[in-house]
């Protein structure tokens, strides 16, 4: 049995490390890994293992890991892939539980590499080892208790509270370089490569409990276990740590081959987007955005409200910041009389003492000090944005120090944007060293603040449980699916689709066939007026043309008369037609047309779609997605995400639609999706949503297996 | 050539190229894992075998050989 947590503790906090396959050739991975461990001042013992060398970097080397006389906690394997299994087997034999395989030449190269990776996993499972990699950059732990740079990165990053996980090793080195320039520190830095054994999910759970990590960033190329990733991220977020993911591969491959509206619109990236939103993972578009948000989480408290004060020495940037703030849903705080009095007394007459505060272009550090202190003290202010443009008299460094000094006394977040490049560089460096978030553009600053604020709001929401409907009939659904499957068909006919939906309590239009006027009346009265009557005959395809359809029938007398009329019309239209009866159908009332859908995604499993229905559904693409099972909050969010939600709330004098019933329909569909994985795709298009309190009706549906 | 002659010659070549004591070159020794051959030395080994036995080997197949005994069998197939 593998104890992931204990193994990962050995990996991040080992007392001893063996570098297996190292050599003396400077500039090669096997050598530089050992060098990096030594240079990072690792708090433990290091054992070079090399078949040929008797010492490496002045340290006695062992021929085999099994020759090491003392216990080894962590082995780092740097041999070529063809012999990794031999080294790993020896590690297992002497009880090493944590291993990093740096070497490439596994799954990523295909062919024999796939077999080699399988072998690695088999050995890991046999000995209960946890393995990071293969094909990775390695692992860094900046915690002073351990201090490991078990990677071939060029440098050890600063200590910090950001945990970074990456599927790409090369991106790691770029990120380390980027972060170094901005004084961004990390708690743990992990390149997990091919994730043959330890996955990003295991690492998320580990970092959830890591006291040194406040925020987790991840670069992902593929999601192999979508539900597992969502669950792990939710657990981390529940523990108060935000999860930011940069996921590459935004193309919607595979969507074109889909057979349903839902299938064609639910591209893999749309689903990934929706799943991340559902799990409250913050999806970032690029590295800049990721770190812009990460430093806000890492350096500053979560704001209590979205009311901010802007302090600027330039009017234009102040307006730009205000625009961006309002665009991102933030509000400008309304200063108290006391605040405006302080500002009025201490700032020049030309200054703007209202929010945004303009301390005027010739402002030195003292004016920023006054404005900052006043803003922080104001009870309506829950965040301060400091804007600076470099004039000839602007004390850039001093102002940066003032921001750091003053903000230190308050538990309110401060964000900065020193606009420019060369002249402001030194001031920015001061801010970054003092862990004050700095943004090149005010727009990025506002977006970061809004993201952090939203995270704080969502943290307070109580997650709702998934409602299970007990009145569904799984037996009928399973029987229908089995029958259709055994007949070799992939589509359910209209009546079978209706039966499946009906078994799940979805409001299918009620209908039955009558063979006499009296029976017709009985059926109509069971269904409820008004009804539609249609001739049932294989010979009469165009029923309306034949006078075989009568709409809006509201009484028993009209049913009897209509029955006779339809029979007469049909006889005239085709005297040879065989009439099987008259279909009595519930008249579909007026309402808004929406679409509900279901699709199976390779990474995330059952995906539910909601959106504007009708024949133009693929033109307007006003749809949203969530991964089943859904709770009420998920459904409310997915409805609110679409433009159609405004229509459903009632616009231009129309009454609001039956949202309660709509939500129930989506929840029932979610349960159907989870309980019957044989259903590959499903469209309910349209679902007619009537006025509030009057329900909804499935007007048409398709189910594909 | 008898198999034991091939074996002796292979071990001699390996010891020379990898600069090892001939006693270390045992039958089941793995060129990389036990004898510490790097990628350059693997190429040198193939060239040295070809010269020693006056043969021309399929390079991809030759480089895939992992142990001394496998090298003996492989070379013998060319003789």
Image (cartoon, helix red, strand yellow):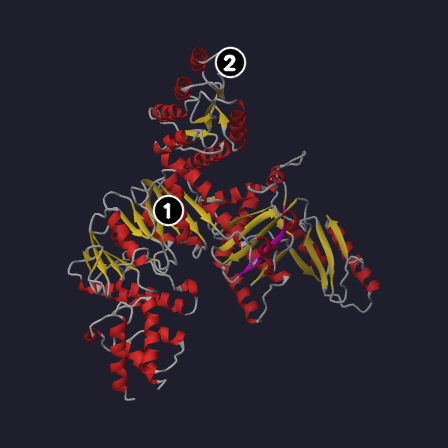
Q: Chain of mark 2?
A: A
Is A269 left or right of A646, judged from the image as shown? left
Choose top left, top right, bottom left or bottom right for residue A72. bottom left
Q: Secondary structure at mark 2?
A: loop
- Give residue A618's position: percent from left, percent from top: 64, 51
Residue range in magenta is A679-688
Is A700 left or right of A394, judged from the image as shown? right
Which quadrant of the figure contains the N terminus of chain A?
bottom left
- Give residue A423's position: percent from left, percent from top: 44, 29
Residue drawn at x 41%, y 38% as measured from the top left = A459
- Give residue A371's position: percent from left, percent from top: 42, 19
Q: Secondary structure at mark 1?
A: strand
Is A555 left or right of A67, judged from the image as shown? right
- Report, in whole angstroms, how far the alpha carbon at label 2 lies from the one at label 1: 47 Å
In the rendered structure, find residue A364 and report the number of the disc placed on it.
none
The question of residue A687 being in magenta is answered with yes
Residue closer to the observer: A225 or A675: A225
Which quadrant of the figure contains the C terminus of chain A?
bottom right
Residue drawn at x 32%, y 46% as measured from the top left = A155
Q: Residue furthest right?
A: A572
Circle 1 sits on which residue? A164
> Disc count in the image?
2
Q: Chain of mark 1?
A: A
The question of residue A657 being in magenta is answered with no
Residue drawn at x 24%, y 42% as measured from the top left = A144
Is most of the magenta stretch helix, strand or loop? strand
Crowding at mark 2 (Cα within 10 Å: few <14, some 14-19, many 20+): few
- Give residue A628's position: percent from left, percent from top: 48, 52
Circle 2 sits on which residue? A350
Is A124 left or right of A272, judged from the image as shown? left
Choose top left, top right, bottom left or bottom right for residue A254. bottom right
Choose top left, top right, bottom left or bottom right for residue A655. top right
């Amino acid at each position: 049995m593998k104890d992931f947590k204990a193994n990962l503790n050995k990996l991040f906090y080992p007392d001893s490390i063996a570098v297996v396959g190292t050599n003396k050739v400077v500039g090669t991975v096997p050598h530089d890994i050992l060098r990096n461990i030594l240079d990072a001042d690792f708090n433990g013992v290091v054992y070079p293992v090399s078949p040929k060398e008797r010492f490496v970097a002045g340290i006695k080397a062992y021929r085999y890991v099994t020759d090491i006389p003392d216990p080894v906690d962590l082995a780092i394997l740097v041999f070529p892939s063809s012999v990794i299994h031999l080294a790993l087997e020896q590690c297992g034999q002497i009880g090493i539980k944590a291993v990093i395989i740096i070497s490439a030449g596994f799954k990523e190269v295909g062919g024999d590499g796939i077999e080699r990776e399988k072998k690695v996993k088999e050995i890991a499972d046999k000995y209960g080892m946890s393995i990071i990699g293969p094909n990775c950059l390695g692992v860094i732990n900046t915690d002073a208790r351990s201090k490991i740079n078990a990677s071939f990165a060029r440098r050890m990053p600063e200590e910090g509270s950001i945990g970074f996980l990456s599927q790409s090793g090369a991106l790691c080195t770029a990120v380390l370089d980027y972060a170094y320039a901005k004084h961004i520190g990390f708690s743990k830095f992990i390149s997990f490569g091919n994730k043959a054994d330890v996955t990003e999910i295991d690492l998320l759970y580990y970092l959830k409990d890591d006291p040194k990590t406040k925020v987790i960033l991840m670069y992902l190329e593929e999601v192999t276990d979508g539900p597992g990733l969502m669950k792990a991220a939710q657990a981390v977020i529940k523990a108060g740590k935000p999860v930011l993911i940069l996921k590459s591969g935004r193309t919607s491959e595979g969507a074109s081959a889909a057979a349903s509206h839902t299938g064609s619109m639910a591209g893999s990236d749309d689903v990934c987007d929706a799943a991340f939103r559902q799990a409250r993972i913050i999806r970032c578009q690029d590295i800049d955005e990721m770190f812009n948000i990460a430093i806000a989480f890492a350096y500053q408290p979560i704001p209590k409200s979205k009311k901010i004060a802007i302090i600027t020495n330039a009017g234009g940037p102040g307006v730009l910041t205000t625009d961006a703030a309002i665009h991102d849903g933030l509000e400008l705080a309304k200063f108290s009389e006391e605040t405006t009095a302080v500002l009025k007394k201490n700032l020049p007459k030309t200054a703007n003492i209202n929010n945004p505060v303009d301390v005027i272009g010739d402002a030195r550090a003292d004016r920023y000090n006054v404005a900052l202190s006043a803003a922080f003290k104001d009870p309506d202010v829950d965040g301060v944005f400091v804007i600076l443009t470099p004039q000839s008299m602007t004390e850039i460094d001093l102002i940066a120090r003032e921001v750091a000094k003053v903000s230190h006394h308050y538990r309110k977040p401060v964000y900065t944007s020193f606009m420019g490049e060369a002249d402001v560089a030194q001031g920015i460096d001061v801010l970054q060293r003092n862990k004050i978030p700095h943004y090149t553009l005010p727009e990025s600053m506002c977006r970061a603040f809004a993201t952090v604020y939203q995270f704080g709001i969502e943290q307070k929401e109580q997650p709702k449980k998934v409602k299970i409907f007990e009145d569904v009939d799984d037996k009928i659904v399973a029987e229908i699916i089995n029958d259709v499957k055994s007949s070799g068909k992939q589509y359910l006919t209209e009546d079978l689709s209706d039966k499946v939906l009906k078994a799940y309590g979805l409001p299918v239009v009620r209908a039955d066939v009558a063979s006499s006027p009296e029976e017709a009346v009985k059926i109509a009265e069971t269904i409820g007026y008004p009804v539609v009557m249609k001739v049932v005959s294989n010979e009469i395809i165009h029923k309306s043309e034949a006078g075989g359809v009568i709409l809006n029938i509201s009484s028993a007398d009209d049913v009897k008369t209509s029955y006779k009329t339809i029979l007469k019309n049909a006889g005239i239209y085709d005297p040879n037609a065989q009439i099987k009866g008259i279909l009595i159908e519930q008249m579909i009332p007026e309402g808004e047309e929406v679409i509900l859908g279901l699709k199976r995604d390779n990474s995330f499993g059952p995906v539910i779609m909601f959106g504007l229905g009708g024949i133009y559904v693929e033109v307007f693409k006003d749809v949203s997605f969530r991964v089943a099972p859904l709770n009420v909050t998920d459904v409310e969010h997915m409805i609110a995400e679409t433009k159609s939600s405004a229509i459903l709330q009632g616009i231009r004098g129309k009454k609001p639609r039956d949202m309660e019933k709509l939500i129930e329909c989506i929840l029932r569909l979610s349960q159907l999706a989870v309980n019957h994985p044989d259903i590959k795709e499903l469209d309910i298009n349209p679902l007619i949503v009537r006025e509030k309190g009057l329900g909804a009706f499935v007007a048409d549906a398709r189910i594909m297996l | 050539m008898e198999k034991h002659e091939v074996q002796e010659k292979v071990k001699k070549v390996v010891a020379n190229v990898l600069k090892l004591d001939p006693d270390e070159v045992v039958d089941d020794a793995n060129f990389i894992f036990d004898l510490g051959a790097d990628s350059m030395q693997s190429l040198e080994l193939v060239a040295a075998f070809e010269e020693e036995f006056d043969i021309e080997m399929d390079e991809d197949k030759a480089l895939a050989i992992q142990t001394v005994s496998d090298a003996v069998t492989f070379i013998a197939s060319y003789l």
